[in-house]
Image (spheres, helix red, strand yellow):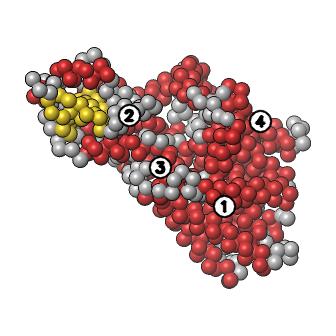
Amino acid sequence: MSAKQLREPSLFLGRDLPAKSWLTILFITILLIGIFFRVVNLDKKPVWMDETHTFSVISGYDDLEIVEKLSGQTPIDVETFIEYKYPNPDKNLGDSFYKLYTDVHPPLYFLIARTFVSWFGDSIKVLRSASAFLSILTIVAIYWLCLELFQSSLVAQVASVLFCVSPFQVLYAQEARPYSLFTLVILLSGASLLWAVRAKSRLPWFIYSLSVALGLYSQFFFLFVIFGYFSYVFTIESFRFTKRFRSFLLANLGGFAAFFPWLITVVIHLSNFKDKSSWITNHTLSILGAVRLWSENISLSFVDPRASEYFGFGRFGFYFLIPPIIILVVYSLYFLFTKTSKQIYLFVLTLIASTALPLIAADLILGGNRQIWPRYLVPCFLGVQISVSYLLTTKSFSLDPIHTNLKRRLWTLITVALMTVGIFFSTVIAQADTWWNKYNGGITIQIAELVNQAEDPLVIVNPSPLSSVFYYAFESDVRLLFASDQKLEVAPSQLDGSIFLLNPTDTLKSEFNRLFNMKLLAQFPNSGPVPGKPTELWKAEERFAQ
């Protein structure tokens, strides 16, 4: 069945059948709801480790620099520390680029984030709003891509609506990280490539070349997407070096040429990149574990089974939704393969495989768990959402006589149900205090509550990247005192109010007891240190008897 058999023209233009006017209202309403989910409660969830890196880049300061600057015998307000995590007169854009240069991160997202904060103010809400804004643009971008791919505005509309309330997209739209930008450049590059393949002019190829450069400056994984595009174009050109394939190669060459200056920095600091990504090889997946996690991750495009714990259902409360979602996805891929041309189904399949296959291969060959992290699988999720959107649109609105009214109504019900569960999970995500993508976010909240509720709290900190996530959750009246393993240079007169030790080493605890003769009681975990728990909070109570 071709896309031409779908009901056209666009529902949004109001020229479809009058009986479907309710669908127009429904689609517009869901789009507005999805946009609302992206911008509401931007500052509610705790900052996590990766987001602290974003703060360091936009300010030009890393945590150790700030600690060295603020260390001394006098406690400081937590706000004083946080002020150094935003653009300030002491550091300029060059310092931000230098940090990116040494840390080997593509710079585009961080430049956008720094611009947002410089223009609109210093707050986590403003910083995350940059990602939310980029995510709103992705809704338009997926519409354009589906319009180019299927030549059907109806498929494009359904895809936009499903994408708009996808729990995965809503979740990462509020991250102060490059994921929304990565999604945007994938969609823009895919749409411009399809346009260039269809058209016979140079402008689409120029736009595609520009999108390649932007993609490489956004996320290194975009290189895998380019390999997917290469496979797609070479295959539809019957593995021949046609004029169109040569245009594709030249466009990519232009994009790589624009990226070449930053590629040099990657080569120079490749050892830094390997060190910072070594954590991903710490645990190797079993085959059964990989299948389970892949099933969970694919379902994230439409539902979030990990919401079970939020409702107190235990770990697997919503897992009953995974099998029907997987069946729907598999059937949609089969339907796409059998009912569309090679130019259509091959694009979706190569998009899905572009990051999935390299990550799986790397885990099998090198060991590790690269394939389980949803944020690395953005192209895969996009391909799945596009495939399901085509299936639902065709089954719900096809004019083919083989689809009876009863079948169309059943598939329309499935479509509306999928949109409804997307809204449900997105609603829960938007108003939750934390979510699984924050990893230790629950610990951050618990510790921050213990400190914030204390009277005149003073937190003695053993400086580490892990400790910095808590500063953003502390109230403004919390005071910080930075210590090291070997020494605690503070006058006893400074130790007033409620005194806490955050992530202290055994040496620091012994030094504290020796100098101030005070008992330390474990607050988190409340039973004392637990193996595998990297975070500890201790509270100084009464002095020992003399």
Q: Which mark is residue 435?
A: 3
Find the distance from the CA under tag 4 to the CA under tag 3. 42 Å
Return the disc, 3 or 2, that comes first in the chain's sequence. Answer: 3
Q: Which mark is residue 535?
A: 2
Q: Helix, strand, or loop for circle 3?
A: loop
Q: Which residue, given by chain and number where applicable, does mark 4 sit on?
A: 249
Q: Residue at x 58, y 75 (%)?
A: 25
Return the disc, 1 or 2, that comes first in the chain's sequence. Answer: 1
Q: Is residue 295 above or below residue 95?
A: below
Residue depth check, mark 1 versus mark 4: number of the one nearer the observer:
1
Q: CB of mark 1 within 8 Å of CB of mark 2?
A: no
Q: Helix, strand, or loop for circle 1?
A: helix
Please tell me which residue lies in front, 357 or 303.
303
Q: Which residue, given by chain and number where applicable, does mark 1 sit on?
A: 159
Find the distance from the CA under tag 3 to the CA under tag 2. 18 Å
Q: Helix, strand, or loop for circle 4?
A: helix
Q: Look at the image and tell me whether residue 347 can be seen.
A: yes
The three-letter amino acid code for the residue at tag 3 is: Trp
The three-letter amino acid code for the residue at tag 1 is: Ala
Whole-percent x and y of residue 137? 56, 54
Residue depth check, mark 4 versus mark 3: number of the one nearer the observer:
3
Return the disc, 4 or 3, that comes first in the chain's sequence. Answer: 4
Q: Look at the image and tell me whether residue 39 can be seen.
A: no
| Horizontal relation, residue 367 to residue 123: left or right | right
